[in-house]
Structure formats: structure tokens, C-alpha cells
Image (cartoon, grey):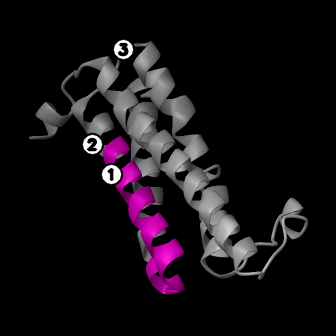
Amino acid sequence: MAESLLSPADPHLILLPMASHLALIGFLYCWLTIERLLAVRARKRTYADLQFAGADVDRGARVAANLRNQFEAPMLLYPLALAIWAVEAVTFADIALAWLFVAGRVLHTAVQTLTGNVPLRGAVFTINFLALAGLWALFLFRHLG
């Protein structure tokens, strides 16, 4: 089983999780725009209020926070995935870990934007962290070991 996970895979398959994450970011930008429009229409904020970070209210504040999160840990995945792709050293384990990371990001988005459950959000973040750490460990093991 472990040998099959470490078998070479089509290098382009590592790019699909990255494209999916970019789609999530695009979705969040659209959602945040709608939340801000709704806040202005409900007279909770003015457009002038929204020129500074931290001015969002209600769910918009959670969406804005989650959007910022998409440029933190995920940015440690992009250079690694591109490096693995560039040297055509992609394995099925790499692809599985990258998809686990993206699935965790989607779940993290749902928990952070739709609930106030911080402990659950932390647990979901752990999925992301472990997938990212695993991908880096596998890469370093293969290329430094």
C-alpha cells in the first residue's frame, strides 16, 4: 500500500488542488462583496466605513477573516506543489495530501464563516496543518534523505 502511494503520478494532478483553492478564494471575494453590499443596504455600514480593514460586521467580518486566512498557511503549499510539479516528482501521496489540505480549507471556511465554534475551527485547522506538514516531510524525505 505505501509503495503504491509513493508511485509516480501524472505531475499535472498536483495542480488541481491549487486550482480548487484559487476557486475557493474567488468564491470568498464574491461572498465578501455581497456581505458588504448587504451591510450598506441595511445601514450597518457605509462604503466609507469599509475602506479600512476590520470594518466588516456580522457574517461579513467572519468571511473577511477567513479570506485573510487563505493567504497564510495555504501559501506554504503553493511553492511546494509547484516545486514537486516542476521536477515531475509527483506521487499519489502528494496528491492525496494536497487534496486533504484543500478539503480542510473548505471545511475551515464553513466552520469559520457559518458558526462561531472556535474549538471546532481549531480542530479543522489541525487537518490542514497535518496535511501540509506531511507533504513537506514527504518532499524533504525524498529530496534530502
Rendering coords of residue 4 (x, y %):
12, 32
Q: Residue furthest front?
A: 41
Helix, strand, or loop for circle 1?
A: helix
In the rendered image, residue 70, in percent from the top left (x then y), is placed at 59, 53
Q: Quadrant of the N terminus?
A: top left
* Circle 3 residues within 10 Å: few <14, some 14–19, many ≥20: some
Q: Is residue 73 left or right of residue 22?
A: right
Q: Which residues are magenta?
A: 98-122
Q: Residue at x 63, y 68 (%)?
A: 35
Q: Which mark is residue 88?
A: 3
- Residue 15, relative to residue 129: is it above or below? above
Give the residue type that dot 1 points to.
Answer: Leu
Name which of mark 2 and mark 3 comes first in the sequence.
Answer: 3
For residue 100, the mark is 1
Residue 20 x, y percent position in the rendering: 40, 41
Q: Is the residue under label 1 in contact with that under label 2 (CB below 8 Å)?
A: yes
One can see residue 20 in this view: yes
* Numbered badge on residue 96: 2
Q: Is residue 57 magenta?
A: no
Residue under the image location 18 percent in, 36 percent down: 5
Provide the secondary structure element on which disc 2 rests.
helix
Residue type (three-letter) at the residue carrying disc 3: Glu
